Image (tube, coloured by chain):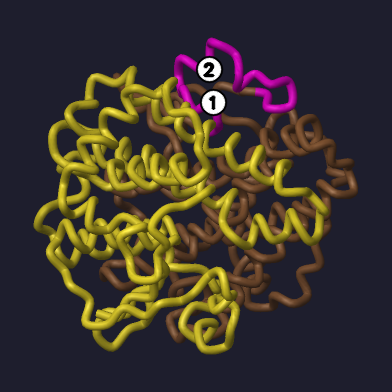
Chain colours: A yellow, B brown
Amino acid sequence: MKFYSFWRSLASFRVRIALNLKGIVPDEVVNVDLMKGEQLKDEYRQVNPQMLLPALIDGDGPILFQSIAIMEYLDETHPHPRLLPADARGRARVRALALINAADSHPLMVPRVRSFMEHELNLDEAAREKWIRHWIGEGLAAMEGHLARDRETGTFAHGDAVTMADICVAAQVTGAGFFKVDVAPYPTVMRIATSCSELPAFAKAHPLKQPGAPASLSH
Amino acid sequence: MKFYSFWRSLASFRVRIALNLKGIVPDEVVNVDLMKGEQLKDEYRQVNPQMLLPALIDGDGPILFQSIAIMEYLDETHPHPRLLPADARGRARVRALALINAADSHPLMVPRVRSFMEHELNLDEAAREKWIRHWIGEGLAAMEGHLARDRETGTFAHGDAVTMADICVAAQVTGAGFFKVDVAPYPTVMRIATSCSELPAFAKAHPLKQPGAPASLSH
């Protein structure tokens, strides 16, 4: 497998956790530096015309893109351990929890969004950070609302085994850390995120543990 | 089944198409008026703590939320006709194409986002529409990049049978129509969207065909 990734990309983080959980070591990891705009260059555009990270090539291709679709693919082709529950209702719940992060929160703060806000809408850094913190908070609140209410919530987001929902909880909370969002109102989310962070598959996948990452982030 | 929906919600539109394709008629459709903010009221918050549409209750629950998760659930519990291909690579491609709309484009223009831009970032209508048109265009361009390149593209987004990808192409193109985005640069997307719109399951699900919808939209 060939994995196109960047240390800071939270979507790449999600796939990295899934790979670790399943014990898959990609043959090659290609670093696509989002801060230098390498995702917009022809070389990567030919891999993924959407020009977003991550992408994965398994064998002779075609390329896999979109982190949720990649995780579903990995779960189907490498079923141990499962990232989705055995029952349809459980799978629906896990997928929906995952999408709070992957669809309704994270896409609102990726580099292309921040760039458009700065250069096309002339929003200053304070306004951009207000925006980002708001949508991270909305995602955390939505997760908390479901996780705190539902009897299916266990040690992890869905029972006592790790699922795709936990991967997305970890991504959401990691984003909150990057942007110093107050996480006190979300105790259930934080309990689960802490349980995740104690697992080597999550800890080793953390953005700040990847090649090229700084020792810490100021925002 | 009890379906929480609103005529204008493109995420509800996606699920409505899936229900139609599978010949499922919900026992009850609950109208949640996004323009009046009914999704934020306690009554709906108790159904879906995320306070977004759509939601679906099948039998004794629990509630299903997030349109992609709901469509996956419907596909698992009502497998005829299938909304996903038989092979893992095909499913990954269809899911990824769907997420261009459902994760990377549509969540950037829903009512809560427009409201935050207006009231918290003080962006006027022109700026908000520039923003919306930009992200609709980015979604269309990403779809076109993949669909025009890939040999898997057929009459529909993946071969000659309708999949979840086509549902999301239809939602993307319908959003483009709402906001008068120039679709000329996306001929493959538009060819597929036209094929979809000729199918009764898509045509009957169209936002402007639902109860409460106006005859047309100025934006």
Q: Is residue A85 above or below residue B32?
A: below
Q: On the image, which quarter does residue A120 sit in?
A: bottom right
Q: How many marks?
A: 2
Q: Which residue is mark 1?
A: B51
Label 1: chain? Answer: B
Residue B36 visible in this rendered orientation of the protein: yes
Range of the magenta residues? B33-54
Q: Mark 2: which amino acid?
A: Tyr
Give the side of residue A178 with respect to residue B117, left or right.
left
Q: Is residue A21 above or below residue A51?
A: above
Q: Mark 1: which amino acid?
A: Met
Residue B172, position as x, y percentages in the image: 64, 57
Label 2: chain? Answer: B
Whole-angstrom CA distance, mark 2 to mark 1, is 7 Å
User: Dot 1: within a 10 Å radius of its alpha carbon, few (fewer than 14), some, or many (20 or more) residues?
Assistant: many
Residue B6, position as x, y percentages in the image: 63, 31
